[in-house]
Image (cartoon, coloured by chain):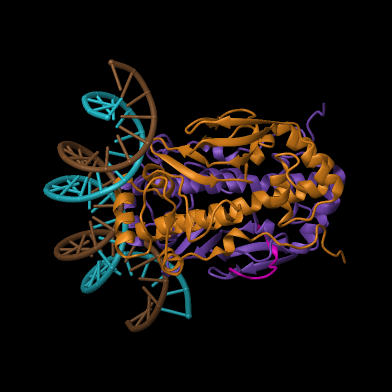
Chain colours: A purple, B orange, C brown, D cyan
Amino acid sequence: MTAATPLSLFVDKLERHSPLSADARAAILALPHTVSELQKGEYLYLEGEAAPDCCIVLSGYVATAKIAGNGKRQIVAIHMRGDGVGLQNGFVARTDHDAQTLSPVKAAFVAGAAIDELVAGHPDAARAIWLETLLEASIQREWTVNLGARDARSRVAHLLCELAVKQERAATGIKRGYQIALTQEQLAEATGLTAVHINRVLRDLRKDGVIGDVRKGVPLTCDWDRMTEVADFRSEYLEIARAGSCVPAAT
Amino acid sequence: MTAATPLSLFVDKLERHSPLSADARAAILALPHTVSELQKGEYLYLEGEAAPDCCIVLSGYVATAKIAGNGKRQIVAIHMRGDGVGLQNGFVARTDHDAQTLSPVKAAFVAGAAIDELVAGHPDAARAIWLETLLEASIQREWTVNLGARDARSRVAHLLCELAVKQERAATGIKRGYQIALTQEQLAEATGLTAVHINRVLRDLRKDGVIGDVRKGVPLTCDWDRMTEVADFRSEYLEIARAGSCVPAAT
DNA sequence: CGAGGGCTTGAATGTTCTCAAATCAGGTGG
DNA sequence: CCACCTGATTTGAGAACATTCAAGCCCTCG
């Protein structure tokens, strides 16, 4: 149950929403994997690659992104400790996005095919990983709302809230004072704004006392209640997966 | 193989990316379901509902959407003939979005729990439905890019392209002249713009000869090449699922 | 100490929104 | 058949929001 292997982090995450048989748990922990340390800015895989590995983030931040034809890069998700990146890679012809580190990262790489075999042999592992991808889909929908329906101020605050809650759950930080690992440039790529405007929005949020100092290396502090209000943030979308039975009572 | 039951439409769609055993196919076709005809504007389910049915669209358009705190509604996906809506409903505690018809719709409703049982008993059906949800996730990522990285003109054109391709595949229309079932108001909700601005964008696209007349009831015509260029549209994200084996060759 | 990456600010520009009003199309009831 | 009603589309003018370009600053690291 403790971190015998780096993958136990991932198992813990899955078990938060899906019970696993001892068998399935063992199979996941037994997945062949390689742990690598990456520098900031390295790519885990690129858009269009045929069958890249997926990976479990052990520390640091990873962003998945797509590049639009006008050259703009759009970050579509941000992953941290315990998250799987590209869990679906074993099932699709080629990836539709790239994955890049936003900070120094330690990650366990697993071949997509290995995941594929795992789910073929272990229905409850399959279900757990499926639910994990459904959770990501829920987050992606909320990002769609964030970009489409909120103004810059709310949009930025919403992203900060999401990161705070995810960090809290990953047990690497605390809600009211945590490290943002993203540069303003990266915040811009995630929110569909420009870095300059991000800077102004952060300044205003600081002026209004919603957040504290935004200095590199210094944990971000904030007034959580005001922050969530500004952000229009409700965390339900981050916990959509049912903590129910593996296979519900049949008729 | 032919439309013995309405669900065969859905089976066909799944088999486009995932081979199904005769057994699994039979199990899907045997899902208990009710076919309903809905008027424009009716809700299939609401955000926050505990365990709504999912449904297979037989004709017409369905949008899934979320409401932001400022009252703005954001459409996060559009479904048409053959698409499943809320396939994940059986697996999550409560839905994070609502589903509403954009036109008169005929749909087959299936209890979430029935899907849950199905996938528990039929691994290849599970895999096929999982891939279907992964495809939707890919589309959702592209929507994120559309809202975050493209200007209004491209954004609207991109949505029109997506609808055209999906319609073509659903075999209910043709790429170069098809029916948009969405009002300008609904296009606005899907693109994160206002209805007024949608109107101006469409006017400009028409003026530039990218699209033809936009009149209700009249199929939209367009210059597909210019349209895809304006839209920055590449259809790969709509076909990300691998047409490969059900269980890949093991080691 | 110099270089570079990230942050900060101003001014001008451009895009999109808001508000308001007019038009159009289709459907209904008299 | 016409008058009316409703929902959808169209257009204009001004305001709000976000971007661009340009410059200067602040840290950190070598």
Which residue does the image show at 84% across and 40% down from the upper left?
Answer: B121
Task: Decide which of A125, A49 is in the foreground and name it.
Answer: A49
Q: Position of residue A13 (x, y in %)?
A: 69, 45
Per the image, is A117 magenta? no
Residue B2, relative to residue D20: is it above or below?
above
Per the image, is A55 magenta? yes
By secondary structure, the bulk of the magenta-drawn segment is best described as loop
Q: Answer with left or right where residue B101 lies relative to residue B30.
A: left
Q: Is residue B126 visible?
A: yes
Which residue does the image show at 76% across and 50% down from the upper left?
Answer: B127
Q: Position of residue B27 (x, y in %)?
A: 82, 40
Quadrant location of residue B68? top left
Point out the stretch of residues depicted in magenta: A47-57
Residue A1, relative to residue B93: is it above or below?
below
Which residue does the image show at 55% across and 31% down from the upper left?
Answer: B38
Residue B41, relative to residue A149: is it above or below?
above
Task: Decide which of A68, B101 is in the foreground and name it.
Answer: B101
Q: Is residue B151 visible?
A: no
Q: Position of residue A81 (x, y in %)?
A: 62, 53
